[in-house]
Structures are given as structure tokens and as C-alpha cells.
Amino acid sequence: MSQVHISEALELGNRVIGEIQRKIDAISDEREKERLRSELERESASFRSEAARYMFGLPDTMFREIRRKVIAVQMDEKLARSLNDEFNKINSAMSGKIPPGFIPEWSEIQSELQKTNALTLQNKVKSLTALLGGTRTFAEKAAHAANISLAGLVEEKYTIPVRIFYPENKAREKNEKSEKLASLLADIADFGARVAFLDENEARKLRPLIDEAASETTRADEFRLSTIRSEVKMRYGKLKEQKVLTEVFKEELRDMLPLMKRARGAETLIVRLEELLTAREVSRARFMPLYADAKILLADQLERITDEAVAEKIGGVLNEMGYTLVGEDGESLSVLPAREVNYIESPYEGYQVKVKVDKGGKLSTRLVRVVAGEDEKNSASEYQKQKDIEIGRKWCKDIDAFHERMKSEGIEFKTTFSKEPEEQPLDVVAKTGSPGRKKRDKASAANAQKRLAR
């Protein structure tokens, strides 16, 4: 029975894995790509080996961490491309127009820029941010000397000129303190640029601290720079975490939406889900209650769909063996409803099989004898009792054959309780008002078919 559920979970999980794999393949940095591929392979193997845990729910939570890492790398790559674009704008504006006295420094900038290609993605972003600050300051001075305007060409990302490539600065003595100050400024420039890239509103709030760090007074104050660095880093960390989680949560909501639209009774949850998909930010406080409610609903829907599919297969196999589900009007029904007690006509006259496909695909069956009225239920001759035993033995053979047929269809039942015909008399039900004679017309059968088709 578990094979049916596992196949449902694997289908959901494989779709999520495929989506994450496509995002990883689109990453440019080969080291990050390889690292994320390895992590996804481990997560995928773990998921497939434990698919039964997710048989009635979405496997998204298992992939939430790898999704978070992929989105974080995508953000860093996008920032690195943005910084490179700024360099390209400056290069384009200054191409062939560098005054002779500035050429050595310009060559050094280009050499430093080339070196960033060999860095890891995190270090590359940091180096580009620091280098861009010095490049912008240099370019403005060189452009002024060459009477070139850079106005409107460069989009400022709140960078700080950490390295200044002027001759007089190059001659400045480098000591331990100046290196420490430069490191603090580089970090502030890095985190500040990242904040500006992620959210302009947050960047505006941060601007006074960035301006203070860039001022002549603060640039030499190690304690104050350390304080500013901590504050800027903290704000960036919170902002990035929220941005990344928003994207992760929205991906999971997008995965969930098609399933919700197929589910019954999900209208209110769909409205809530679509509202979050259009929200600028999705916090844990807003996401988790909706996700939990949706998973409960989807778990029940998936379980019911699976139960109905199993019930349909059971009904089909029994019908082929001569057992038929009959409606109140005596017409044969093609669908065995799940989670309901049903009475099936057996090939042995006067006997029916009580069948129920319960929650989780559990199957219970019992052979019963049908009598004309209530007054006959408690009167059975020795001949009738012996006949019940004989029909019971035939049913036992049939149910063994039924189990083999279902196993060949990929559905295996584990017997938890059974009794031989000699051990207990058959239950007897009256034909009039029999609980198995429920009113089912063609429309109800068609509706059941539609539920399965969905």
C-alpha cells in the first residue's frame, strides 16, 4: 500500500529538485555551482530514501535550506554583475581620454579589476565594492583634468574610496593601524553596497552612517569605524535574510498553488496564498500559519485521492473475479467509493462481501450472508452453517488470489487480522434496509469518477 503514497511524494519532490537544479545550472560561478550541486545531490538522495515521511504532504521543507543558499548566491551574482556594469560605464566614458599623468594609476585599477575574476564570489563582491569606490574618485579627478563629464553615467551604490590611487597617497606609509582602518572601511563599503542593492529605502536610512564613515574625521577613528561596521553589517544581515526568505517562501507558495486549485474546499486558503505572492515581503509570521493550514488540507486531499485510486483498483479487480458493486436500483457500479462501507455481490448466491477502503488505504473485508428479513437473521440450520463454512473457504481462496492480483498491480496489503470460516459464524444481514444498499445513482458514480480524474 505504501508504494502508492511514495510515488505521489516522489512526484512532488522530483519537481522541486528539477526546479532547484535549473537555478543552480544558471549560476555563473563554477565553485558555487559545484558546491550547490553537491548539496542538492545529498538532499535529493536523502529525500528519496525517506519519501515515505512525506507521503501526505509537500516535501518543500526538506529543500528549504538548499533553496535559501541558491537564492543567496543568485543575489550575490546579480550584485557582482551590477558592480561590473558600473566599471564598464566608467571605462566606456574614460576610454582613450585618460590624461598622461593618470595612466599608471588607471593601469593599476585595471590590473586590480582583473584580479577579482579569480576570487570567490563573496570576496569578489567585497573587492569590487572597495575598488569601485577608489575608481570613482580617481575617475572624477581624471575626468576633471580631461574636461570630461561623468554625470549620469555611474549609479552610486554607496561605495567608499578605500584605496586611493593618487601618487601622494601611494607614498603614504602603510602601518598596522592604516591597514586596520582600510579593512573596516572595506567592510562598511561592502555591506553598504549590498544594502543599497537590495533595498533603496533601507539604504537611505543607512546613508548618514555611510557618509560619517567616509568623512575625514571618522576615517581615522578605529573605534567609531568598528561601531559603524557592526551596525551596517547587522542591518545588511537582517535585510538579506528577509529578502532571501521572501523568495524561498514565494517559491514554496508557487509550488503549492496548482495543488491548492485542485483541492476541494481550498478557496479561502487560495485567496490568502495569492495575497502573499503579491506581497513585497513575506515574513515567517505570515507564511508559517498559511503553510501549515495548506499542508493539512493537501495532506488530506492527497490521502483521499490515493485512497480513491486504490478503491477504484480494488473494485476493478474484484469485478473481474466475479464480485460486483451494485447500487440501490440493482445497477452495477464501476466505482468503489473510498472511506465508506460497501456491500459487494459475490459469485455465490445469497452471499455478499462487506468492503471498506479506509483512510490510509487500509482495506477491511468480511463475507456476510444475506437473508430476506430480520426474522431470519437468527435462525440457521446445521446445513446452512455448513454451507457458510464452505462458501467461507471459497472466499478465503478468492481473497488470496485477490491479494496476488493487487500485488501484481503494485499494491501490496499486509494482513493484520484474519479468521478461518470455522472459527467464527458469518455475519448475517437482512436484504431489506441492508446497510450496503445505499442510494447511488449514475450522477454520484460520475462525480466519483471526476474526483479520481482530478
Image (cartoon, grey):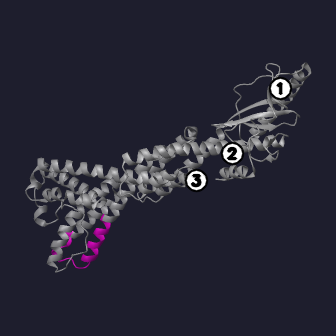
Q: In the rendered image of this protein, does residue 179 appear above or below residue 342? A: below
As drawn, which residue projects farthest toward the left?
217
Relative image position of residue 241 (x, y in whole percent): 33, 49
First of labels 3, 2 by sequence position: 3
Residue nearest the observer in this picture, 429 or 188? 429
Q: Residue at x 25, y 79 (%)?
A: 96
Q: How many marks?
A: 3
In front of the other: 445 or 298: 445
Q: Is residue 211 left or right of residue 399?
A: left
* First along the sequence among labels 1 and 2: 2
What is the CA distance from the residue labelled 1 to the residue labelled 3?
A: 49 Å
Helix, strand or loop at label 1? It is helix
Residue segment shown in magenta: 83-105
Q: Which residue is drawn at 80% across and 25% down?
A: 426
Q: Label 3: state its secondary structure.
A: helix
Q: What residue type is labelled 3?
A: Arg
Residue that badge 3 annotates: 262
Report if the CB atoms under discs 3 and 2 are less than 8 Å apart: no
The local secondary structure at tag 2 comes to helix
Residue most extreme to the right: 383
Q: Residue 251 carries which label?
A: none
Per the model, the C-alpha gap separating discs 3 and 2 is: 16 Å
Give the amino acid at mark 1: Asp
**Mark 2: few/some/many CA within 10 Å (<14, 14-19, 20+):** many
Percent position of residue 365, x then y: 75, 32
> For mark 1, does the 10 Å Cα neighbourhood hold few (<14), some (14 to 19), or many (20 or more) residues?
few
